[in-house]
Amino acid sequence: MKEKNIRKAPMRDNRTKVLFVRFSSLGDVILTTGVIRRFKEQFPDYVCDVFTSSAFAPVFEGLNFVNRVVSFDKKGGFKGFAKTVQEEINDYDYVIDLHANLRSFLLKFMVDAKFLKYQKDSAARRAFVKNRKCTERLGMHVVKKYAEALNPLGMRECTLEELRPVLYSDKAENSGIVLNPFASKPTKQWDKFPELAEKLVEMGHKVTVIGQGSFPKVDGVTDLTGKTSLSEMFDVIASASVLITTDSGPMHAGTALNKKVIAIFGSTTADFGFAPDFDGCAVVEVQGLKCRPCHVHGQEKCPEGHFKCMHDISVDDVLKLL
């Protein structure tokens, strides 16, 4: 008797599936990577996926502890976001909200999963800017706060260095000292980067400039501004001996690529928990200015008109940290 050809339903993957959510911005997305890596090490049988915007999906390229990256194009608006959720976000046991914004909040009502959210402490940051009111949690590094959100799943406490972010690059070409003079706000930008570049060339260093913006021509400097994709920028930083940067996404890329990082802070401060407090990193800033920080994210111009937080940082202040 001939056997019937019976089509079997696909087996469900019974492993615990966890979705980590962080949509933007570049530095914040990069900072999730070390937390996800440590979580995967502690729970190797869990499936760890990521949900982010398409602009930052390259952050997770080559990271073997991330199973899948789900991304959406912000240009598609909420309709495009909802379509991605409907088609791609399903069958998860846990959603870990590491963004805590409106979009990630709405996700809670669109997905059948248990939600865990990190404590953002936005109000505490604003209070510190307004009246210098300090709380115990204010200076806690954001990677520790990300990891804290995983406590209900039994994640063991990690040191800051254990939670250091990570990016993948197999770049071997030497790009020398890499400069990133750009940032999201003008008050986070240092005006002496061209002078620094000239001095470094005089000292015999190979110098490469990266980022999105315009940099004046300096003899002997390789200017890659506006000429690299996100992944290509990571490769340039990976091949650097030192990264000198503003408080920005590339700063976090430098720490994730285990580079020596010299970060120049102006209108923002390390008090918000985003400074590169990892081995091999240093922050240059003007101490004692009562007007710092003037804003949580920086401003278009100095509200006091003097911009001392950046003007009072000299080229020598940076060079002595090389």
Image (cartoon, grey):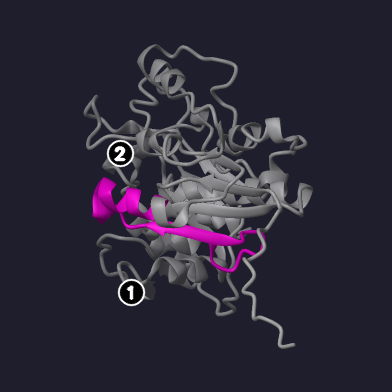
- Indicate the position of residue 321 as horizontal and vertical percent values: 57, 50
| Rendered residue at 39%/64% (across/down) | 210
Closest to the observer, 16 or 193: 16
Residue found at x 48% / y 52%? 89
Q: Residues within 10 Å of mark 1 (few under 14, many from 20)?
A: few
Q: Is residue 129 visible?
A: yes
Assess whether residue 69 is covered by the magenta stretch: yes
Q: Where's residue 217, x and y in %?
A: 27, 69
Q: Which mark is residue 318?
A: none
| Residue 202 visible somewhere in the drawing | no
- On the rendered image, what quadrant is the C terminus found in? bottom right
Where does label 1 land, which residue? Answer: 219
**Which of 198/163 is in front?**
163
Residue 39 pos. (x, y %): 70, 46
Q: Few, some or many C-alpha atoms within 10 Å of disc 2 (few <14, some 14-19, many ≥20)? A: many
- Stretch of the chain drawn in magenta: 60-85
Instruction: Please check the rendered image and state whether residue 28 is part of the magenta-colored stretch, yes or no.
Output: no
Which amino acid type is marked by label 2?
A: Thr
